Image (cartoon, coloured by chain):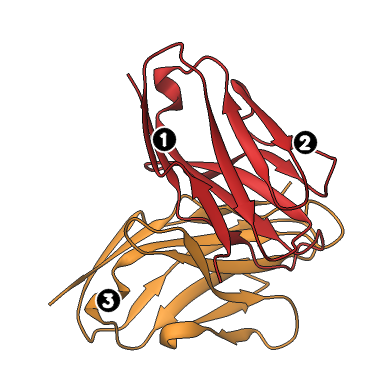
Amino acid sequence: NAGVTQTPKFQVLKTGQSMTLQCAQDMNHNSMYWYRQDPGMGLRLIYYSASEGTTDKGEVPNGYNVSRLNKREFSLRLESAAPSQTSVYFCASSEGQGGFEELFFGEGSRLTVL
Amino acid sequence: AQSVTQLDSQVPVFEEAPVELRCNYSSSVSVYLFWYVQYPNQGLQLLLKYLSGSTLVKGINGFEAEFNKSQTSFHLRKPSVHISDTAEYFCAVSRPGGSYIPTFGRGTSLIVHP
């Protein structure tokens, strides 16, 4: 039972390069999320998708784009990476939008921008 | 909008001692409350959640938390910790019918010493 799978687990980029973080869930969940985790800052929401076909900005969307490719997959794209985007990125999913559902997290993608 | 404050960034404790990790939230309406745990180099997983009913909630690994509406708190406790409890702990809040996406606190690092 894979749950939420993120790729790649580690990535080093140079300033200005682009890349896409992939996320897939096999739990038939409707909602998916991208968070970033920085020391002392907790988790901050970048983008979310309440259901297939919809995406919305979270707390820190600048410099990122997302695509909800289908119900299973939700990707995060950095078009022109900056050192401030050095972080650990987590994808998560939940069954619905009631607020009471548990979030299931991937293991994280550690990104360094030089 | 709701917010969460975790009062301690780091809590050191000796093995077999009791521990309390503090969490306060701000919201003028009803809330759902969660504690998640993140072991080193892993994603977050749910420890326990309060939705309604009994204010004392029991979770996995011997943890429990008490919802106190008058003090807007949801502190996490364990009567006797193990080395394996060393991890980052996150408190989160969401609202029924409103902002359903959880807002996370900045995290508390629990360090258990032998």
Mark 2, secondary structure of its residue: strand
Q: CA distance from mark 2 to mark 1?
A: 21 Å
Q: In the displayed image of the protein, which residue is found farthest to the top?
A: A16
**Which residue type does callout 3 highlight?**
Ser
Q: Is residue A97 above or below residue A100?
A: above
Left or right: residue A12 versus residue A81 is: left
Residue type for callout 1: Ser
Query: Residue B89 at what x, y percent from top left?
Result: 43, 63
> Where residue A87 is drawn, which disc sits there?
1
Q: Secondary structure at mark 1?
A: strand
* Residue at the (74%, 68%) spot, across then down: A100
Chain identifier for the orange-coloured part of the image: B
Any part of residue B63 in sight: no
Say which mark, if any, is on residue B84.
3
- Please report contact status of discs 1 and 3: CB closer than 8 Å, yes or no: no
Q: Colour of chain A?
A: red
Say if labels 1 and 3 share a chain.
Answer: no
Residue A2 vs residue A27: left or right? left
